[in-house]
Each structure stands twice: as C-alpha cells, then as structure tokens.
Amino acid sequence: MKTLTVVITGGGTGGHIFPGIAIAQEMIARDHQTRIVFIGTERRIDKQAMEMYGFDTRTIHCKPLKGSGLWAKLKSIGLLPVSLLESLLVLRNIKPDLVFGVGGYVTGPVLVAARLLGVPTCIHEQNSVPGMANRKIGGVVDRIFLSLPGSERFFPEEKCFLSGNPIRKDILDILAEKQSSNAPTLVVLGGSQGAHSVNRIVPPALDLIKTRLPEGFTVIHQTGVADEEDVRQEYGRIGISARVTAFFSSMKEVYSEATLVLSRAGATTLAELTALQLPMLLIPFPYAADNHQQKNAQILVDSGAAKMFLEADLTPEILSVELLSLLLSEEARHKMAKSSGALARPHAAQAIVDQALTLLRQKEA
C-alpha cells in the first residue's frame, strides 16, 4: 500500500485527543512515512497536547451545541456552514486517504466534509454512552470503533467494531519499566482541566488520617489552573508531602509512581488505569453528558477494579476511611489491580489500525 496521509480530528478534552494520538503513533509505527495531520479547535488543551507530541495541526472555527444556553446554541448553529466550508478547504489541501474522528464537536463538520469529498471515514467512541457528535455522524461514516460493550446500540451495528480505547505508547511503556516502591503514592486526577470539588475534599480527608498514613506517603495532585495555589497551600498547612500542579505535561512519570489513583471517570483515563493495572477510587463528574462518567465507573466497580463515590454523597470522613483502608492494605490493592488489568485492552490501537487499513484496501479494490 502507498504511503498514507491520515487526518485525525477531535478535541476539547484530553479524553478525546489522547486516543487520537495513540492511533497516530500506531499508524507511524507501521510506516514511518505516514503523514498525520490533526484538525482541532483553538482550545488550550488541544494545543498543549499537540505541542507535546509534535504533530502537524490545523484548526477550524467551531462551537459546541450541547450544554450551551439558547443564544450560544444559535450562534453555534449559525457557525456550522463556516465550519463545514473551512473543513472542505483544509481537506482539499491535505488530500487525506482517511479521516478519523475521535470525538468532540469539531469532528462533525470535518467528517461531513470528508464524506462529501469521498474520503473513507472512521470514528472512535470512548464512552459507554456516545457523545452527540459521534451519535449524529455514526450513520454516515464507514467504520465505528467502540471502547465498551453495549455502545453498539447507538449505532448501525454492522459498522461497529469493539476495539477498546487506544492508549499512547509512552503510557503502555510504563508496564515494562515500573518498579515497586516502598513509599505509597496517591495520585489525584481531576480530568484535563481539574475538578474543584475533588480538590476541595482530598486534603481534608487526608488531614483526618495523617497520623495513620504509611511512612513516606506522598501525594501527586493535578488541580487545574484555578485551584493550584490554594491546594498547594492546604497540603502545606496540614503537613502532607504533595507535588501539586495544574496540568501534567507527562503522565508517564505520574503513573509510574502511583500506588493508588483517585480520579474522575473519563473513559480515556480509565483505559490507561486498567492497562497499567492500578487500583482506583472514582468520583464521576456529575454533569457529564448523559451521565456517562458514572456509567463508565460502574463497569469497573462491577468488576472489582474500583470503588465509586457520587460527588453529592461524599464527605471528607467517608473518603478518609476508604483511602486509609486501601493505603494500609497491599492485599486489597493487589486484588483491585488484578481486576483492573483483566478489563484492559492494551492492544486497542493495533486493532483499530488493522481494521482501518483493511477498510482502505476494500475501498481501493
């Protein structure tokens, strides 16, 4: 097969961008001459991720339809013809062999433009309940890759392939390199933009049990920009060793040190945690579209890989009990880690690229 040009489109959160990066890495691993171009938005999270991995990028003007007020929604609808025209112009310039959508509102106009130009198209859905963009576009793309069983009910079943959620190569490399540590480390993740309620509850919970924590215990806490300094000061006040930052530029270093993870329940984060066989405490974002984070988390809870707390019911006292129980019991953590690993699909990127290349061969035949 000739050297390929592949467009990957998506964005708005790391959960959308990172599976796209994993697919790009696998495409390039198959053929180093493969040209990858990302089409995304002007949002900061998209730019940071692309700069980190050095991929060629383009942007279009596009706004979300879901979760906006009436006036914002009308403005977004009015922008759609511009988004489509920009997408058509960008794709005609790039001349891709394949356009791959990984979720987020930017995918809609780009995939419609690809369809109008006759370019083969695929999408990947990370969550148990698909986002609006993927649901709308699922009827016209050629192939639909799913992370979780049950998602196929939202799409034409004959187009669906259960692949799992693709994970970046640098994350998967941790398994081969990770060394056990005698000093337990709690990693706190609030998602790509932080989580104020998580930031607010973790330090007080640890304060309640600080005299009983294992020797050498430390925290690595990702806060988002708004809460970074307040959380850092709070750990200093209660006397707990903590590395606090707004955003991790390298998750590889963070995951490699983790003993236990307290996190939101975005699908990409869960895929990474299960692949790395890490025990986890999950606090789903209560305002996620279609409550998909709670549904994501429930799958792990049912398998014994995680414990879940609903934000509305959680107090520092409740969280402190669960944290101490797991931090003091290596056996409990090991049991959860084993269940976590059993859910993993570490070869999702390879499976997706296999299917995408088969699709292209079929189109050429």
Image (cartoon, rainbow, N blue to C red):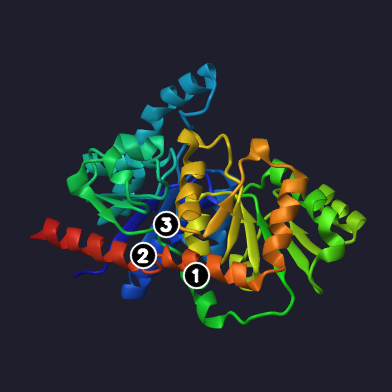
> Which of the two labelled residues, at mark 2 and mark 3, occupies the earlier sequence position?
3
Q: Tell me the amino acid under the disc marked 3.
A: Gly
- Count of labels in the image: 3
Q: Secondary structure at mark 2?
A: helix
| For the residues bearing labels 1 and 2, Cβ distance under 8 angstroms | no
Between residues 104 and 106, which one lies in front from this camera angle?
104
> Which of the two labelled residues, at mark 3 and mark 1, occupies the earlier sequence position?
3
Q: Would you place residue 324 above or below residue 299 in this image?
A: below
Between residues 264 and 36, which one lies in front from this camera angle?
264
Q: Which residue is mark 3?
A: 20
Q: Tell me the amino acid under the disc marked 1.
A: Lys
Instruction: Kindly tell me whether residue 240 is visible in this rendering.
Output: no
What quarter of the picture does the C terminus occupy? bottom left
Location of residue 152 in the rendering, given as x and y in whole percent from the top left corner? 28, 45
Location of residue 190 in the rendering, given as x and y in whole percent from the top left corner? 64, 50
Q: Secondary structure at mark 1?
A: helix
Q: Hey, which quadrant is residue 151 in on the image?
A: top left
Q: Which residue is mark 2?
A: 349
Q: Residue at x 25, y 54 (%)?
A: 161
